[in-house]
Amino acid sequence: MLNFDFYNPTQILFGKGQIAALAKLIPADTRVLLLYGGGSIKQNGVFDEVMGALAGHEVLEFSGIEPNPSYETLMRAIELVKRENIGYLLAVGGGSVIDGTKFVAAGALLDEDPWSIFDKRSANVLSALPFGVVLTLPATGSEMNSGGVVTRRATHEKRSFASRKLYPAFSILDPSTTYSLPTRQVGNGVVDAFAHVMEQYLTYPVGAKVQDRFAEGLLLTLIEEGPKALSDPEDYDVRANVMWCATLALNGLIGAGVPQDWATHMIGHELTALYNLDHAQTLAVILPNMLRLRKEAKREKLLQFAARVWDLHGGDEDTRIEAAITRMEQFFEQMGVKTRLGDYGLKADHIDQVIAALEAHRMVKLGERRDVTLDVSRKVLEMSL
Ligand code: NZQ
Ligand code: ZN
């Protein structure tokens, strides 16, 4: 097992009715800014529940944080925070609202343009406003990690940041808030969580048995419960298991002490920035062929994945590996997330643009062995047409 330093201070309140705890979680003597997206929380009752819990607080609102939150929108939130002397932020929504809130929490305390966070790799994030989360979409793990992704619409750049100052103080996970999710977002969430596990699990063995078994447990649970979330959307236990899986998939636990890949995510971010695919759609397209192309370097873990996750034991090694990757692809399709670039209208002549974007963002040596060069990324994209 590799050395590690695991730190995660986020308090998790899980279950029905936990939104009421907001009254005590947020200090009453500070002005609160509630940040949310396009209005789903007004339709499903979550907004009313949050406002009811915060009846004794002074609450201002900032709405309109879009999927793949934009720098342009978030700068308006930062202005509001400064103008209104806000002391606490509350993100109510999915990964986009949470990531956007993290950017606001850091950006509001900076004396320079917050875009500098990306150029300085978050080294200038020395402090941040405190913030909490009410999660409504299990997918990204942002509710219990310190990372975020923000898009600059003007330049089609999607960049990520992370800082120890940006863990939520608390996150409320009430599975019943997810009943109202459209099927597309249910599928997206399960595929994103699956890919997060794979980026940390499917590398090469380092004797990290606990991390491996945890990762396999999360994958098996997503495979079992994901389709049920589509067919029986109001099954509380199904939603609860999917929600907790997504959080544990990217809260640092399974990634501690093991090599990590993330090449699929980096290519995926460029596809979203350039062509507006949903985050999970990019992963469903890239991950299978990323594994196929890098089969030799990942052979041992691919065989372990085949045996322990897909129960594939017969035939020669290459047959088992291909069968496991195909089963994973079929699972993504079963969750309603298409797995070819062509499904999203992308063709061979788009690939140069993706490669140029990767180069511009210095994504030229990706993966757990830093051997995913632009040539490798190009081949993966070609295989995924
Ligand atoms: O905007 P509203 O009206 O809230 O609607 C949202 C949005 O349209 C809707 N939604 C959320 N909860 C709902 C709901 N609709 C009905 N009922 C509910 N309960 O779902 C749509 C998508 O929301 P979004 O927050 O964009 O989805 P997701 O959670 O998948 O977040 C995606 C973003 O997170 C980033 C992605 O790149 C992308 O920008 N990621 C963040 C990570 C992190 N912080 O660690 C890691 C990930 O790999 C990922 O990159
Ligand atoms: Zn992701």
Image (cartoon, rainbow, N blue to C red):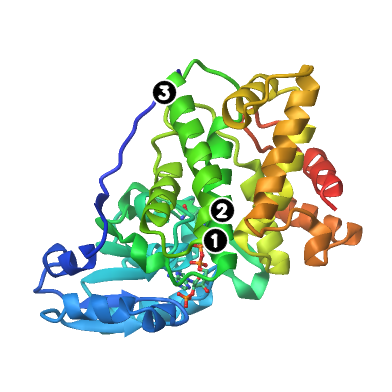
Q: Which residue is mark 1?
A: 231
> Which amino acid type corresponds to the residue marked 2 in the rendered image?
Pro
Q: Where, quadrant-wise, is the N terminus in this rendering? A: top left
Residue for badge 3: 210
Secondary-structure class at tag 3: helix
Q: Which mark is residue 379?
A: none
Q: Tell me the number on the disc at residue 227.
A: 2
Marks 3/2 in contact by CB < 8 Å: the verdict is: no
Task: Tell me which corner region of the image, top left, top right, bottom left or bottom right, holds residue 282.
Answer: bottom right
User: Which badge, 3 or 2, comes first in the chain's sequence?
Assistant: 3
Residue 125, percent from left and from top: 36, 55
* Residue contact between numbered discs 2 and 1, judged by CB atoms under 8 Å: yes
Where is residue 175 shown, x and y percent of the image?
35, 60
Tell me whether the residue at label 1 lies in contact with that at label 3, contact meaning CB atoms closer than 8 angstroms.
no
Estimate the x, y position of residue 158 in percent, counting from the top left. Answer: 60, 61
As measured in the structure, the alpha-carbon distance from the residue carrying label 1 to the one carrying label 3 is 32 Å
Other residues around mark 2 within 10 Å, as few (<14) / some (14–19) / many (≥20): many
SS of the residue under disc 2: helix
Kind of residue at disc 3: Val
Label 1: which secondary element: helix
Specify whether residue 130 is in view: yes
1 or 3: tag closer to the N-terminus: 3
Which residue does the image show at 13% across and 70% down from the upper left? 23
